[in-house]
Image (cartoon, grey):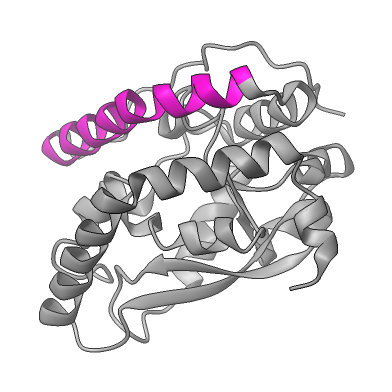
Amino acid sequence: MNSTEHKSIPGWKRALDIVLIILALPVLLPLAAIISLIIWRVSPGPILFQQERVGYRGRGFMCLKFRTMHCGAETNTHQGHLQDLMASDAPMVKMDAKGDSRIIPGGKILRSAGLDELPQLINVLKGEMSLVGPRPCITYEATKYLPWQRERFNTAPGLTGLWQVSGKNRTTFTRMIQLDIEYSRKRNLWLDFRIIIMTIPALLVQMWDMKQGKKAGTRPVSSEGVIPARATNH
């Protein structure tokens, strides 16, 4: 990684990321070890999954996750699902909500709780991501963006963000982009603290939605995010 990637994150943001990760290590390391052991026991193959994602200013980087799918799982289904969400006003519900045979035992819980993204703390330490920012999108998603939507790349991607605490799976793709752009414009220390504090309640809501969606066999009802967007659809 070159030094320009470190410069993409303001000094205060970089300091906040490193301090919070160090403080959380006594909890995160045992948790990561337990998750690794579970994946090793339930599914043959690597524990970590690597995938090229698009980060700050459109730069590509290898994003890390705990593997929650069987090795060799096909991706065409996911690409079709994503394209449908991008072209519609449907809520951003993952395929998990409708059942996905590609997911390993326990993988759905890891995904709904956001625990599969813990290895991205390594990406944060490397300066490729931040704790707070837009989610790092997949390369084939970025190729579909309209010019105005690419403004979301004006800040480093994050583990959590304004979209994640503003409804996430209850919002549309366009609303997600608007919230990401709003964050890139308003980014400041207080906003990052606020988003971090709101992340755990947001994850609990996400897990509840997943549980209810499984019971009902339907998608969660769509709702608007709590913070108005400044970006407009051009």
Q: Which residues are magenta?
A: 190-215
Residue 166 in view of the camera: yes
Q: Give whichever of 3, 113 is nearer the camera.
A: 3
Q: Give whichever of 229, 102 is nearer the camera.
A: 229
Magenta region, main secondary structure: helix
**Residue 78 at x, y percent in the picture:** 47, 63
Q: Give whichever of 40, 71 is nearer the camera.
A: 40
- In the picture shown, does residue 64 fall above or below 117? below
**Residue 230 at x, y percent in the picture:** 77, 16
Q: Identify the image quadrant of residue 116.
A: bottom left
Residue occupying the point 67% across, 69% down: 61
Image label count: 0
**Residue 12 at x, y percent in the picture:** 69, 34
Residue occupying the point 40% across, 41% down: 93
Q: Identify the image quadrant of residue 39.
A: bottom left
Residue occupying the point 64% across, 48% down: 157
Q: Identify the image quadrant of residue 215.
A: top left
- In the picture shown, does residue 231 fall above or below 90? above
**Residue 210 at x, y percent in the picture:** 24, 38
Q: Quadrant of the C terminus?
A: top right
Q: Is residue 212 magenta?
A: yes
- In the picture shown, does residue 101 fall above or below 167? below
Residue 132 in view of the camera: no
Q: Is residue 59 magenta?
A: no
Residue occupying the point 74% across, 40% down: 11
Q: Quadrant of the N terminus?
A: bottom right
